[in-house]
Amino acid sequence: MFLSCKKSEVVVELSVLATASDGAFDDQRRGAKPSGPSQGQRDLWTLQQLRERSMSAVQEVESGTGADEIALFNAISAVASYASQLRALSAKVNLDDRKLVQFVWTNALNSASFSSHKLGFELGAVLFNAATLLCTTGRATVMSIDPAQRSTFPAAIKAACNALLTAAAAFKEIKTVFPLSQDSACVDFTPAVLDALEAVLIADAQELFLKKAVFDNMSPSTIAKLASGTAETFRRAHTLLTASSINGVFPANWIQLARGKLGLYEGISYYNQSKVVAATSDSGKYGIQIAWLRAAQNALKSVHVEVFDGGANVAMRILKGVTGAVLADTSSGFYFQESLNRVKAEVMATMELVKGVLLPAEKDNDIIYVETVPALSALTIPTVAIMVKPDIAPLFDIYITNKIFPPLFETLTPLYIRQSQERYLKARTAYLQPIEDLQTATTTCRTGLAAINLPNAIESVFKPDSQILLEMQQSVMRDCVGDVEFNGQVPPLAHMMQSAASLLLSQRDKTSQLLRAARAALDTEEAEDAEMRHGFGARWARIESSKLTRGLKEAIGGYTDKLDEAQASDAIVLGKVDGNLQNLALLGDEGLLSVLIQGGGGGPLGESGIAAEAASRDEVNKLKGALALLNDLISKRELFLQDVQAAKAADDILPSILEASNGVHVMNEEDVFLANLKKYDAFVETSLASLKTQNNIMALITTRNQKFVEWVQTNERLAKRTEFIADHARGVALFKEIMTNLGAGIKFYTDFEPILKKLLVNCQDFCMTRGIEKKELLAELQQKSISQERQVWDGNLSNLNFKFDHNPPPSAPPPFKRQ
């Protein structure tokens, strides 16, 4: 192959697009009831088959198992079919931001992997493979063209030219469907690489156009222009292939071939221009003819030296794999080797042709015409005639197999329609901004009322004393008592707090005792060890206890520090208990609370004079009236907003957009939008009126609230009741705080107790082990002492001169025997 195809080893499930795309693939028909998969979902499954079919066909061609023309054509058909349907999908939906599927492809030029969630990347990879396959079939046709076969030569030239130009267009299209920066890791899709590939194929197609002109025996003037255009296309290809930004991406034989053809067709252009001049009757034509022939000779000599004399060895080493080309495909190497051989032969033949004309012309001019030979810079270069341009249409027209796979995704709403719908929603949002402002105004209104404590301030004035007492008791039960059962009555809070404090002290004493016991055990053992060491001296040969207990003592020290910190915190909490015990005890005293609520007036609870007095105040009644107006306005507004939401839910712009669509875009889109938005005019007007009414009522509330506040602040009894309620709330908060702190302390000691128990056990085990060791060592020392004393005693006895009779004593008489 001319170029390797991209490969994708990762299995992609395109059906995921249907299950996670917010209904983009659901049936769009009016009134259609879902019964099984939608047509869009079935089309996705078909697209999945097309993808797998294209992958398999490419693999078959690249592996060599299907390298014949039929397999190559089938691969192009499969890849083009997938590409066309994929392009149809991307024209209908835009799912790039959803990141539903991850496409992974291996670069053809450096074997590195690149991944993307965008459909454009998948389409670009498929277009790249389509272009590669088209290059292969186009260049295979070029290599097999034989001008002697006059009946098949024109058709073969046309087929090869179309394939190359379609491939060039596919490379160019990639820059549109998936644009990347030059420094991207996906080297196949960088602009410089795609530009170079496109330029090479355009030059090859232009070369075929020139060969067809030569085959048709066109005039030297036409040949000169076409050859000049061909040289120019190869000059651009050579420039792009050698760009510094892609240095090393393309193999050197590509560059050698482009340079060789540049010089060859430049020489052919100049040679044919000399023939054009020779056919004229202009004065000085002989000198000009020689100038063109010399220019042709120089161009051909230059390429002969650069590419085939000085450069042939380099090219051959590359082809043999010494320096290593980027592409390892043997057929690619064969193509470039054969092409270089052909170009070299054409250069040599053209050089001989030019030489055969130039030498006689120079001789005739020296002897007969004696005309000045101008420099090449003084001549008019033949017009550059580039007759080819990329065209991607054949890829989607010629190779689409509609008979096998019908066009997909026709039931989906086109992307431009969906985009028009999105623009309408944005226009509708802007059009309904007054309604959005109305929702914001409602929130602002409630926030403003809360800031001036309305309507709570008025409700508290009219609240009966009995209700206040009940709420106080409920707050105590809820915040102070919790789940503790006291038959619905407020328990003695002081007793609860004292019990918690007593439990805290009890738990603290337990932990302190455990820590003291652990320390005492170690101290006792260490003292006994020191006593033994003092008594026995060096004979008490075991490690000192102080060295062995270092870790345990450090643990005891750390735990002691923690207990000290905890006890310091306990002192603060217990101080709060002692300082507030009497006051907090009043929280649950119903009789005292009732007296205090009434400002010390005593008597049964009921409607106090405060409520009666408030009901007679004009400023209070006017404020209540303004608040009632505002509440009524907001209540109606909520119903109004529900109507707006219902209208928005029923709003369907799609029929109007489709009616105004010409298949490419929506005509007069703004007029269509405005016509549809007029049904919201009444809503907008109502919103504006409601906003104005709210502003007026809020101004009225602000004025009347000032007078209400003045009355509240000057009412001594109300101020006392308000202050007492606040004090009660602070007392509840303080009780909660103290109980929370006591609970935290109890939990600390409870959690700390098993840790200290374990520490004590470790210390006791250590002491027991050392005690056993002590007894064994004492026994050993005592045994050694006895042995040493016996040795001393035996030695003293051996020095005395005692004589002993060692004869045995006489035997006893035999027993008496009866006769």
Image (tube, helix red, strand yellow):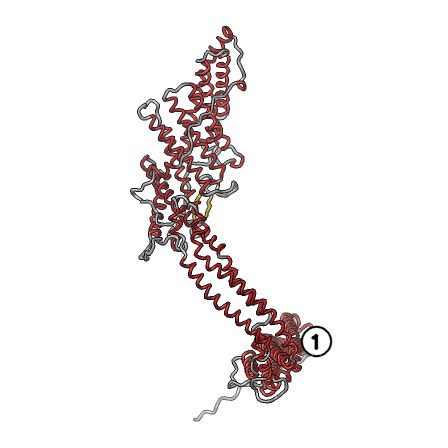
**Amino acid type for the residue under numbered disc 1:** His
The residue located at (36%, 36%) in the rendering is 394
Q: Is residue 220 above or below residue 560?
A: above
Residue highlighted by disc 1: 534
Between 449 and 224, the residue placed more toward the observer is: 449
Which quadrant would residue 597 be assigned to in this image?
bottom right
Please give the name of the residue rendered at 45% of the width and 35% of the height, measured from the top-left corner.
197
Q: Is residue 473 above or below residue 344?
A: below
Tell me the SS state at disc 1. helix
Label 1 Cα crowd, 10 Å radius (few <14 / some 14-19 / many 20+): few
Badge count: 1
Where residue 363 appears, as percent x and y from the top left, is 49, 9
- Specify whether residue 77 is in view: yes
- Across and down, in percent, residue 210 comes to 41, 24
Name the residue at the front extreme.
618
Residue farthest along the top direction in this orientation: 368
Is 259 on the left or on the right of 708, as rendered? left
- Estimate the x, y position of residue 301 in percent, counting from the top left: 49, 20
Which quarter of the figure is the C terminus placed in?
bottom left
Q: Nearer the viewer, residue 802 or 603?
A: 603
Q: Where, quadrant-wise, is the N terminus in this rendering?
A: top left
Q: Residue furthest bottom?
A: 819
How far across and down, in percent of the image, does residue 195 sit? 47, 35
* 689 and 517: which is toward the camera: 689
